[in-house]
Amino acid sequence: MKTILEFSAEEQQEANTAINGWRYHSVIWDLQQFLRSEMKHGDLSDIQYLCYEKIQTKLFELIETNQAHLE
């Protein structure tokens, strides 16, 4: 499959976002894995665990809302 995206000179920011999409994907994946690892293996207090859990829940919500699945 081949996809061609065209941007005008005024759309440089949009072009950069499209070109760097894999980097954003990588950041979100790494954050998701960090949260999971810390919650499973980290030496967290109850309050810390709840904070991580809240962040993880929000991350999953944003991924779902934006249909940005990480498969």
Image (cartoon, rainbow, N blue to C red):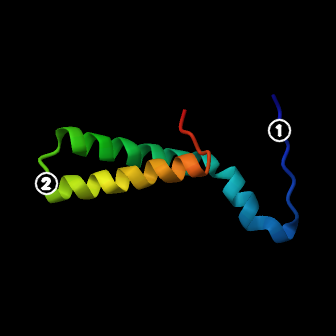
Q: Position of residue 5 (x, y in %)?
A: 84, 49
Q: CA distance from mark 1 to mark 2?
A: 48 Å
* Residue displayed at 53% across by 38% down: 70
* Residue displayed at 64% across by 52% down: 20
* Residue displayed at 58% across by 51% down: 65
Viewed as shown, does residue 7 lie left or right of 18? Answer: right
* Residue displayed at 75% across by 58% down: 15
Which structural element holds mark 1?
Answer: loop
Contact, mark 1 vs mark 2 (Cβ under 8 Å): no
In which quadrant of the rendered image does the N terminus lie?
Answer: top right
Task: Give the mark, 1 or 2, whose residue is nearer the N terminus.
Answer: 1
Circle 2: residue type: Asp
Say which quarter of the image contains residue 41. top left
Q: How many marks?
A: 2
Q: Position of residue 43 (x, y in %)?
A: 11, 47
| Position above or below: 57 against 37 | below
The residue wearing badge 2 is 46
The residue wearing badge 1 is 3
Q: Nearer the viewer, mark 1 or mark 2?
A: 2
Viewed as shown, does residue 26 lie left or right of 67? Answer: left
Say which quarter of the image contains residue 67. top right
Q: Position of residue 59 (x, y in %)?
A: 44, 52
